[in-house]
Amino acid sequence: MPAQLIDGKAFAARLREQVGEAARAFEEKAGRKAGLAVVLVGEDPASQVYVRSKGKATLAAGMASFEYRLPADTPQDELVALVRALNEDETVDGILVQLPLPRHLDEKAVIAQIAPDKDVDGITPTNAGRLVLGMDTLVSCTPLGCVMILKDMLGDLSGMDAVVVGRSILFGKPMAQLLLAENCTVTMAHSRTRDLPEVLRRADIVVAAVGVPFLIKGDWLKPGAIVLDGGINRLDAEPGEERGRIVGDVAFDEALPHVRAITPVPGGVGATTIAVLLRNAMVAAHRNAGLPAPEGL
Ligand code: GUN
């Protein structure tokens, strides 16, 4: 049977539609729009693109967007003061500090200042702890999107062998916790894993997020595996190309004959992140306004 291509764009479009409806209902009940604040420090080109897209998508969903662009040399105390002011601002339901931060800033100390109820990335110590404890909480957008896609496709994930490649705080670690909560047998692989092909050969579900183009070869995969590729890697430009192609962590063409289903790059996992961010912001807004959780989100 030919492999199924998992359409992240279609998933995102459906979710955005639901978020839009929830945003309209929220505005009627709360008498204000739900608000999402995004903070960007410095001029990293990829981060600038992400932040612009997040702002546009927030407005398109009928929510208020607050964007803060700070210079690359912003001192720690100024960034912390902004986060604290956003914590206190009643028109702001969600706060996202775009990562990575410039090297002179203490990323973990900044994250720890975000009010857990507004932490739409689910990376404050409180929310990361709640996830580990199996409590209801805000969860990092990309892994939450992956588990939503898997549950849409498969229903029950109980007993499946899942391998997560990568252990970042925004992707690999929460991904493993979410799969564990769905009763998968979870293995976390990373840059020091001794024999990645051997580890991957058992995996019914592979989730990759390491940032190494084409790291995972087709014949490392178990026949019939489901592969979610969270890699977003830009190759060097070929002659005649203005910019290099964006590719994933999985050697996609090689993987196709081996897998049951796979996300393309682009148009797969990456396409879902912003829609899940809007979803998280709506969930946070309802909680912060004392309203019941929005239907279906
Ligand atoms: N940088 C790349 N993706 C993300 C994300 O989902 N959240 C934050 N805060 N920073 C990012």
Image (cartoon, rainbow, N blue to C red):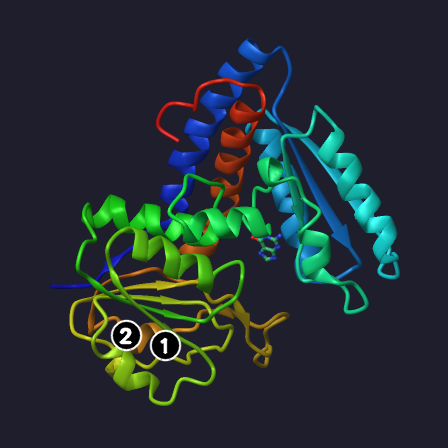
Q: Quadrant of residue 87?
A: top right
Task: Left or right? Give the position of 134 relative to 201.
Answer: right
Tell me, yes or no, if residue 240 can be seen here: yes
| The quarter of the picture showing ligand 1 | bottom right
- Which residue is identified by label 2? 255
Task: Tell me the quadrant of the picture where the C terminus can be found.
Answer: top left
Say the numbered circle drawn on residue 133: none
Expressed as whole percent of the image width and height from the top left, the position of residue 23 reads 52, 22
Q: Measured along the vertical axis of the image, is residue 123 above or below residue 161? A: above
Task: Left or right? Give the position of 237 relative to 130.
Answer: right
Considering depth in this image, is 235 or 143 the residue closer to the camera?
143
Residue reaching furthest left? Answer: 1
Q: Residue at x 68, y 57 (%)?
A: 47
Amino acid identity at mark 2? Ala
Q: CA distance from mark 2 to mark 1?
A: 6 Å
Per the image, label 2 sits on a secondary structure element best described as helix
Q: Measured along the vertical axis of the image, is residue 47 above or below residue 89? A: below
Considering depth in this image, is 206 or 176 the residue closer to the camera?
176
Q: Residue at x 28, y 78 (%)?
A: 200
Q: Residue at x 38, y 57 (%)?
A: 177
Expressed as whole percent of the image width and height from the top left, the position of residue 116 reads 60, 40
Q: Are marks 2 and 1 in contact (CB under 8 Å)?
A: yes
Amino acid identity at mark 1? Ala
- Which residue is identified by label 1? 251
Q: Quadrant of residue 222?
A: bottom left
Residue reaching furthest bottom? Answer: 194
